[in-house]
Amino acid sequence: MINLTKLAALMLLGAVSIAHAWDDRRASIPVIVNERTIPFYEFAIYVMPNSPIQVAFIDATDGGSVTFLGQTLDLADAELTAPAQPGLERLVIRNLSSDEEIIINVFTLTPAKLVDREQKLNGYRIGRYPSTPRNGQDIYLPPKGFVEVTQGNKDVKVSPNFTLGQFVAKQASGYPKYVVLRSNLLLKLENILATLNRAGHPVAGFTIMSGYRTPFYNRAIGNVQYSRHVWGGAADFFIDDSPKDGRMDDLNKDGKVDRADARWLSQFIESMSQRGEFGRRIGGIGVYGSNSAHGPFVHVDVRGSRARW
């Protein structure tokens, strides 16, 4: 699936990002934002300029309030709209039933129509998306917009244990950079991380080797045209807790680090899939071994159908 020699060379141009220590907190009553159920105290959504933002609780008998763009409103009466300009705003949702606050980091996207004739967005090379979606699937349509990543927002949480900057393409460039990120991917990664910990495998976080890839970068490393990375729906990652040395841990406890450790992690994720823990996010799982530039790692994605390699 990947030209690993090219990937190794190009990855030297960008630092590998590491997740924060595991945060296992869950809201007692999940919030629903734009028809997506969010069980966490902090999460991110991605919206086009001037688009509506709908907020509700699954169950909140005493109601709630929202604070957004300097206004605090009763949840039942709130009609929220994304800003006209791209950027980051914080939406704070308070549940009066549980006295909990949930933070939604609202990223207003930079419209894709602003990509210029050189396939750049504010100087950042995006490349060209395929004009025809794979098998007519909507998940392969070109994105409508991109999250602008800056020095100031790269460490903002997009879910409890992952930050925006972890998913940026590893192509060489200054700021701003741009990214596409699927909420379903974050939900899947959080699920895997939580299940590992609850199964007795203490894991502080995942090292994301590769998250989003621009079409330009994806082509440069020789990957397939319709890689889910290009649509922000895939992550290549490994566990690097003990020792923290930039490579996969000895997960199967055989005294060495090799492809077998990636296989152990993939089998753990596969067992979750077989139990139905991903629902419609069943997606793909890939296993990769070591080369001279990196250790073994696992690929997961949210393509909506089963794929294994």
Image: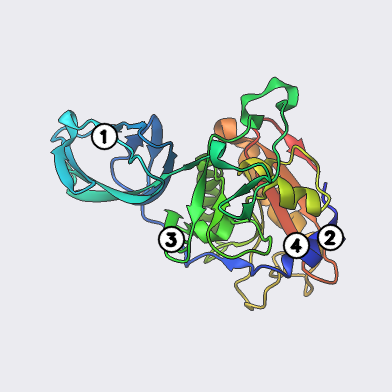
Marked residue nearer the N-terminal end (1 or 3) = 1
Where disc 3 sits, the SS reads: loop
Q: Are marks 4 and 1 in contact (CB under 8 Å)?
A: no
Task: Report the amino acid beneath label 1.
Answer: Leu
Where disc 1 sits, the SS reads: strand
Q: Nearer the viewer, mark 4 or mark 2?
A: 2
Marked residue nearer the N-terminal end (4 or 1) = 1
Where disc 2 sits, the SS reads: helix
276 sits left or right of 104 in the view: right
Measuring 70% from the left and 21% from the top, which residue is drawn there? 136
Residue 261: mark in rendering: 4
Which of the two residues, 116 or 9, is positioned nearer the viewer here?
Answer: 116
Q: Are marks 4 and 2 in contact (CB under 8 Å)?
A: no
Q: CA distance from mark 1 to mark 3?
A: 22 Å
Residue under label 1, please give it.
Answer: 80
Q: CA distance from mark 4 to mark 2?
A: 23 Å
Task: Report the amino acid beneath label 2.
Answer: Lys
Rate crowding at label 3 as few (under 14), some (14 to 19) or many (20 or more) other CA atoms within 10 Å. Answer: some
| Percent coordinates x, y for residue 276 in the rendering | 58, 34
Q: CA distance from mark 4 to mark 1?
A: 47 Å
Residue 6: mark in rendering: 2
Q: Is residue 276 visible?
A: no
Q: Are marks 1 and 3 in contact (CB under 8 Å)?
A: no
Residue 153: mark in rendering: 3
Q: Nearer the viewer, mark 4 or mark 1?
A: 1
Q: CA distance from mark 4 to mark 3?
A: 34 Å
Rate crowding at label 2 as few (under 14), some (14 to 19) or many (20 or more) other CA atoms within 10 Å. Answer: few
Number of numbered discs present? 4
Marked residue nearer the N-terminal end (1 or 2) = 2
